[in-house]
Image: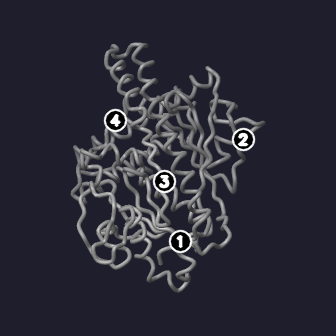
Amino acid sequence: MSGVSVKIKCFRYRLYPTRAQETALNATLDTLRLVYNSLLNERKFLYETTGKGVSQYAQEKHFAEWRRQFPELAQVHSHLLQNAALRVNLAFTAFFRRVKNGEKPGFPRFKGVGQYDSLMFKEWGNGVSFKSGKLYVSKVGHVKGKFHRPTEGTPKTATVRRQAGKWFVCIACEVSPEPLPTTHEAIGIDVGLKTFAALSDGTFIENPRFFRRDENALAKAQRKLAKQKRGSRARRKARKVVARIHERVRNRRHDFCHQNARRLVNRFGVIAVEKLNVRGMVRNGHIAKSISDAAWSQFRECLTQKAESAAREVHAVDPAHTSQDCHQCGHRAKKTLSERWHLCPMCGASLDRDTNAAINILNRIGATMRGRYTDQEAVGL
């Protein structure tokens, strides 16, 4: 981690386009959706008739002729057209990768109305930039926004996105790491469902269960949506209500993960976490919804990114038997999921089951860390 010289940091801002600007943005998205579908159809047709594909760059050569034939394409920045071709290429690359790995292939599909939601500018300053306190977007104009903090480093790309009837811009910047003062504290983290996480120092992070809290409101909104006639104005309004509930849950979960990851990175120099196969775990229909609501993967990603920037260390360890092994003497005793307390029959150690697991997780990196951290400085090592 210490060898990372630059990293990508994204800055997201809410945009407030005028009605005319929103019409232009929606028209651009719909034009790009048609371009995407045309490129996808070409690849599909060639593959079915000749058994051969076509490259992204060969497809991009169509754009000059299409611009002459279809005037609406003249209102679309060239980078956005190139990005549509890139998305088609990525869709087919992922399809063939899944075929090769023996996974469910999922052939690339055409995008219906409203399913193309973002404009990707691959070069900041070319088609998108800040001008006079507003965001300038090519072919759209100067869009007002809530730019609540300045960007850092060097802006590289920008993505204007439509989400639940709102508009946002995400600016990706190259920034240099900002190491925090050195600390010799270390911590182990055991994630769960009863509590979001148990720490090896005996403390816990409570599970907020954001989705569960809004589940009834979401079910009510979805029932109302199901009753509306397809294509009607009432259905569009009902769909927006459903989307905003999902957005609210997503925003709260995002904020929770970032805040807790920041607290841990600020305090601890070494953080040990479980190496979990979350994708495999959510296949268990009984607890899949609770696991998704806990957002373990999102938390782990936030923790890793912040640690890289702060010159901290995050170690992923094998979680096997961490709940069954005694952290004090190593005796292994099987426990049912309903047993929430660890009481070792050999040495008499008595503590919360998840705290015991968190200490074991930290102990598994102890052999490699003892050269840098003393037993007094690192909890559980």
Image mark count = 4
Residue for point 61% across, 20% down: 19
Residue, disc 3: 205
Nearer the observer, 202 or 272: 202
User: Which of the two labelled residues, at mark 4 and mark 1, occupies the earlier sequence position?
Assistant: 4
Front residue of this view, candidates 343 and 31: 343
How far apart are the alpha carbons under marks 2 and 1? 42 Å
Q: Which mark is residue 30?
A: none
**Which disc is residue 186 wearing?**
1
Measure the alpha-carbon separation of dots 4 and 2.
Answer: 34 Å
> Crowdedness of circle 3 by 10 Å Cα count: few (<14), some, many (20+)?
some
Query: Given the current orientation, which residue lies at the most extreme bottom position?
Result: 371
Q: Element type at marker 1?
A: strand
The x and y percentages for residue 378 are: 54, 76
Q: Are marks 3 and 4 in contact (CB under 8 Å)?
A: no
Residue matched to label 4? 110
Q: Residue at the location (46% across, 24% down)?
A: 240
Q: Earlier in the sequence, mark 3 or mark 2?
A: 2
Task: Please report the residue visible at 68 percent of the width from the left and 35 percent of the height from the top.
Answer: 146
Say which amino acid is labelled 3.
Ile
